[in-house]
Amino acid sequence: MDQLVKDLSALISKTVENNLWRQRRCFNLIPSENTASLLVKLCEISDPSGRYAEHKTVLKKEIEALTGTGALKGDQVYYYQGTDFIFDVEEKLKTTFGQYIGASEVETRPISGQMANEIVFKATVKFLASKQEGFPQLSASGRLASVMNNSLNYGGHLSAQPFGALFNFAESDVVNFPLEEKNSYKIDTQKMLELVEQHRPSLMVFGKSMFLHPEPVRSLRQHIDGMAGYRPVIMYDAAHVMGILGPGFQDPLAEGADVVTGSTHKTFFGPQRGIIAANLPKESRMRKLWTEINARAFPGSTSNHHLGTQLAMLAATMEMNYFKADYQKQVLANARAFAAYCAASGIPVEGGEAEGYTRTHQVIIRVKAYGDGKEVASRLEANNIVTNYQALPNDATFYHPSGIRMGVSEMTRFGMKEKDFEPLARFLADIIIHKKTVAKEVAQYREHFQTMGYCLPPEETMKVAPALLESIFPNHGYFQSCAEALRRL
């Protein structure tokens, strides 16, 4: 026991130091990360964490056999007892997230954005195998005959590549979206439509990980609606932009996407999960696609769908629905201001100056003149600025990237406004261009941004935190005393 205590104490000490550094002393600019609120984190470690609630939609032929068994909850059959609470949570999450994104159907069980994508790929194959009128047929090997996506070298996500999650579901005919000649971060809409006419893809996957501008979803949908005898499945991977979908950026479902997928912990400030949303009501000719998505979620992809983070996701979605307008407006304004300040400091900024560099939370800079992207990212980290090195268009290899990818969403939640990014841009220039050491100054500047916003305020969180702590750790006097101390706070 003495050795166990010693080993665990050393682990906890290192954990605390990492917490203090990442949450208090450094600027986290990784665009695929965010920090959940205290309330969301408390929900995440509550009792549902570690429990099971396998369930599936009941078939008509199964209803009579299941009636009176206690297994039915709504139109779902549950294979475990003790699941009434999590059933209510899951149904509420479907409704609440549906309100956020404007969807009538929501699948909450994927535990990552990549799993959400793979579920849709599987479901699309099954849907097309049923030979729906007007939709492309599968290849002779039973795969998607043609797919259009964003190239990995130009920011496309790994999961939508033929060597990623798409590996088992598509033939080799993968067509990349064409890009504008003067801005390789934007799709050339006219050329895209010409390629659609030529290749007639079975599946079109919008969305990327290097995401600076909206995708031309509306233009595509209007075009294919006018094509006779052809209709692809239109998917929008919103992993990076899930938290900014809406009037300030774009609304993919309203613009014509069939399905939106994504992770829930980037611009959307929830726990690490995945989600799928659509508007495919029972009378829709594409309803079978949604039933296949449900079936590929369970039992097709997962058994335990991590109920603790699902409860936390509901809390985060409630927070997002309340703070959405203000949060999104500030994130978008901060990114454009940060990009402009970086450019003014002498740092080359990607995305097109005429376009304001960015329409999302991301800012991408080109650092090749000052060192390899990996080396520059390491220097930034040593100076308390955490970023993500990134291969840029025309880079020969990801092993020697020219760029740094940054995002402002987490620091926006910690209180930064447009003007606050000017000193941060100067620190970047000092580190990147002038190769100065400014770690102490950066940490001191971070002290101004310590309180998280766009979530349940601390004083309200402290009203409910004691009860949560006591229920999570029952019959432990120490935790009860901690809870009592929180009450006094």
Image (cartoon, grey):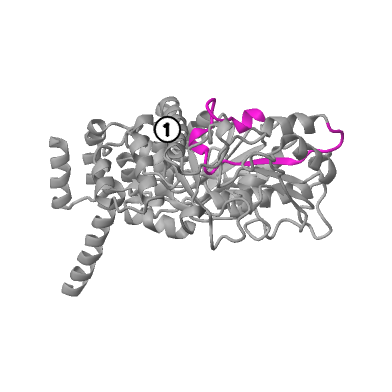
Q: Which residue appears farthest toward the right when viewing the image?
A: 228
Query: Residue 303 at x, y = what percent?
Result: 52, 56
| Residue shown at the point (57%, 51%) measured from the top left | 392
Query: Residue 207 at x, y = what percent?
Result: 61, 43
Residue range in magenta is: 227-255
Closer-to-camera residue (165/59)? 165
Total marks shown come to: 1
Query: Residue 271 at x, y = what percent?
Result: 41, 46
* 272 left or right of 296 in image: left
Depicted 414 relative to depicted 322: above or below: below
For residue 234, which quarter of the picture? Answer: top right
Query: Residue 48 at x, y = what percent?
Result: 38, 49
| Residue shown at the point (40%, 44%) measured from the top left | 34
Q: Report if residue 183 is visible in the image.
A: yes
* 161 left or right of 133 in image: left
* 56 left or right of 429 in image: right
